[in-house]
């Protein structure tokens, strides 16, 4: 598997990331509705976003000086997007 | 493992939920790992999905060439057909207190149709017992007897 993948390290990252993302203000997250986003590795802020594609998000992550392998990619559903 | 539900705002208050302004979904971050790379992306637990399927950008991010990979397809609610290609990868899931890694054959969408992973039966629900705790707004995920991987502890 990936030479640089350390499951213990990834677990420790999730220990920090999950509560931080949960604490991120919903009203701030709602500014990204309908967009694909990349969270910072610690879950405290959003590093990049795009309404076009995840490829564009990955490029923006690199441009922002982050390693895409360290970020968490996500999607913020649009306010009118419901699932069935 | 326990994962908090993810909140999603809705424009029209949800009548069936007493006029709620937000919905809560069983989504959490999962890692896709190959010899060439790794990618962490949110996935939604989906008991109606036969497979685990990732968005179309993931193969590039983890160095997978799917040109000759086996093809699959599935019909979404509403009738739209999603095409994907299969590959074996390692998956890793952790809530920060414990973690699990396992090998699974999963699908990668052929086109950018879904912006999140679907955590269906083959590769995920077959290996984990999942409890959706609606009142607590959390997903509880525990490996079952069929789980083929390893537990990771601090």
Image (spheres, rainbow, N blue to C red):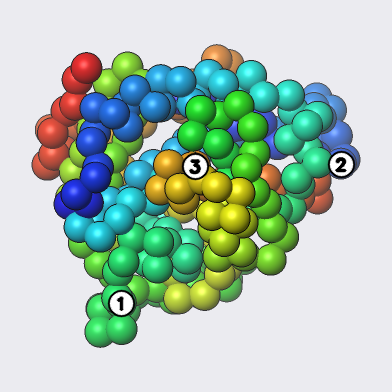
Pinpoint the chain carrying mark 1.
B
Q: Are marks 3 and 1 on the same chain?
A: no
Q: Write the residue at 51% across / 45% down.
A: A66
Foreground residue among B116 and B37: B37
Badge 1 density bin: few <14, some 14–19, many ≥20, Cα 10 Å? some
Q: Write the residue at 40% across / 68% down.
A: B60
**For mark 3, what is the residue?**
A72
List x then y, in percent, for residue A62.
54, 54
Q: Answer whether residue B23 is visible to the viewer in this image.
A: yes
Residue B93 figure quarter: top left
Foreground residue among B58 and A42: A42
Disc assigned to residue B11: 2
Q: Write the residue at 58% across / 16% down.
A: B135
Asked if labels 1 and 3 touch by Cβ distance under 8 angstroms, the answer is no
Please identify the residue farthest to the right as the structure is shown.
B12
Badge 2 density bin: few <14, some 14–19, many ≥20, Cα 10 Å? few
Q: Is residue B108 left or right of residue A39?
A: left
């Amino acid at each position: 598997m990936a030479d640089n993948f350390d499951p213990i390290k990834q677990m420790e990252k999730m220990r920090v990331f999950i509560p931080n993302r949960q604490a991120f203000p919903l009203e701030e997250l709602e500014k990204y509705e309908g967009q694909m986003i990349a969270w910072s590795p610690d879950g405290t802020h959003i590093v990049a976003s795009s309404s076009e594609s995840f490829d564009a998000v990955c490029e923006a992550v690199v441009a922002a000086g982050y390693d895409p392998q360290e970020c968490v990619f996500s999607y913020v559903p649009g306010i009118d997007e419901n699932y069935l | 493992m326990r994962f908090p539900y993810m909140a999603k705002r809705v424009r029209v208050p949800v009548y069936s939920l007493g006029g709620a302004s937000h919905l809560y979904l069983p989504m959490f971050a999962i890692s896709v790992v190959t010899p060439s790379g790794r990618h962490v992306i949110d996935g939604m637990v989906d008991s109606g999905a036969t497979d685990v399927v990732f968005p179309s950008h993931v193969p590039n991010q983890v160095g997978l060439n799917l040109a000759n990979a086996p093809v699959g397809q599935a019909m979404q609610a509403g009738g739209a057909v999603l095409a994907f290609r299969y590959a074996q990868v390692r998956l890793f899931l952790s809530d920060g207190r414990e973690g699990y890694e396992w090998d699974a054959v999963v699908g990668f969408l052929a086109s950018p149709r879904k912006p999140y992973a679907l955590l269906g039966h083959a590769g995920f629900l077959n290996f984990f017992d999942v409890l959706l705790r609606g009142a607590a707004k959390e997903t509880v995920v525990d490996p079952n007897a069929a789980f083929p991987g390893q537990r990771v502890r601090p």
